[in-house]
Amino acid sequence: MAILTYLTTTHFDFGAIKVLDKELSRLGVKRPLLVTDRGVRAAGLLERVQAVLAEGAGLPVFDDTPANPTESATLQALALYRDQECDGVVCLGGGSAMDLGKAVALLAVSGEPLARFDPLQRGGKLITGVAPVICIPTTAGTGSEVSVGFVIVMNDGRKLTIADPRIIPKVAICDPELTMGLPPLLTAATGMDAITHCIEAVLAPAINPPADGVGLDGLYRGWRAIEAAVANGGTDQDARWQMMMASTEGAMAFVKGLGAVHSMSHAIGRRHDLKAHHGTLNAVILPTVLRFNESVCAEKYERLRAAMGLAPGADLAAAVAAMNKAIGLPSGLAELGVTEAMITDLVPHAMGDLAHFGNPRRASAEEYAQLYAQAL
Ligand SMILES: [Fe+2]
């Protein structure tokens, strides 16, 4: 079993969940709140995790995580955490359950309200501490198990990103076995989220060569494994392992920042009338943003091409669009319910998103409107 100590101690292998009890005692957590969602419970994964715990099913469970985590669901989970006198959080699920659990761990120690921790607001509240968090991903995409922040849809409709090194989970348990039953479309969407993280992190202008190296390695693995993980996900253990590693590496890399793909997809994801998966949105938007950024990233594009096994000078955007097609994802935002009339609403939210500031070429409001129109 590989044990990677980056900032999170990551246990990574088939069967890794068996270290959960040991890690809880190492962190001194006696009564964790298990944060998950109904789908994870229905897939039998909660039961599998409870089976490796000495307390079994005796620990409190919050399974009401929505598809996109919300402030109100966070407050419900926080109430349960306090009521049950919990002293840590175990997140089991995809990005939503992990992000919601991380938000609970922040509020449990640093107090409320969530909006006061907005990094883009001056005079925001200081993070005084975060309860210990152990994350167990059940998808390979978000990388939230090692990431520096979380994203929550606020009661006022904003999609807020809160990022701080103290939010990085103490422990990640990456057990690719938990992803073997993930359906093809969800494998494709989450996998393209991981690939987008690797690409946007490398392109983000912050100087962090170690993070670039991790991102390029994640891209190398994810790009080669995604088709097999989608086509033979129930049996191809190596493809599942590679995708989970690409996901973890993507999030390690995006400590540098993300870019316009994420600012645009976050703006769409905050709308309750559009149900598109975050990873699907990123996959569909990625070719358009790759074309937009190309003029300022020539050298980095060569490194991306090399990691993806493409010929020098190959059309990156076209390669991504072809991959989307091969793994059954849509070719445009219109297929996901986005209309031209929505663009005026989306643009200011994309410009107010934290990821907007990590894009290598700063987009104006007009340019965002054009990018959305091109991605339709
Ligand atoms: Fe993402």
Image (spheres, rainbow, N blue to C red):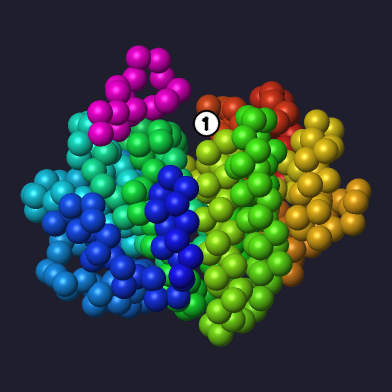
Whether residue 341 is visible, yes or no, is no
The residue shown at (57%, 36%) is 257
Q: Is residue 123 magenta?
A: yes
Q: Is residue 142 left or right of residue 194?
A: left
Q: Is residue 323 left or right of residue 75?
A: right
Residue 17 screen position, x and y as percent: 34, 70
The residue shown at (56%, 72%) is 240
Q: Is residue 331 magenta?
A: no
- Of residue 153 and residue 5, the one placed in the foreground of this image is 5
Q: Which residue is mark 1?
A: 354
- Dividing the picture into quarters, in which one does residue 129 lie? top left
Residue 75 screen position, x and y as percent: 22, 43
Residue 120 screen position, x and y as percent: 45, 23
Q: Is residue 321 left or right of residue 114?
A: right
Residue 1 screen position, x and y as percent: 46, 70
Q: Is residue 97 left or right of residue 241?
A: left
- What segment carries the magenta color? 114-129
- Dividing the picture into quarters, in which one does residue 246 lie? bottom right
Q: Decide whether the magenta segment is chiefly helix, strand or loop.
A: loop
- Dividing the picture into quarters, in which one does residue 118 lie? top left
Q: Is residue 243 above or below residue 47?
A: above
Q: Is residue 16 above or below residue 34?
A: below
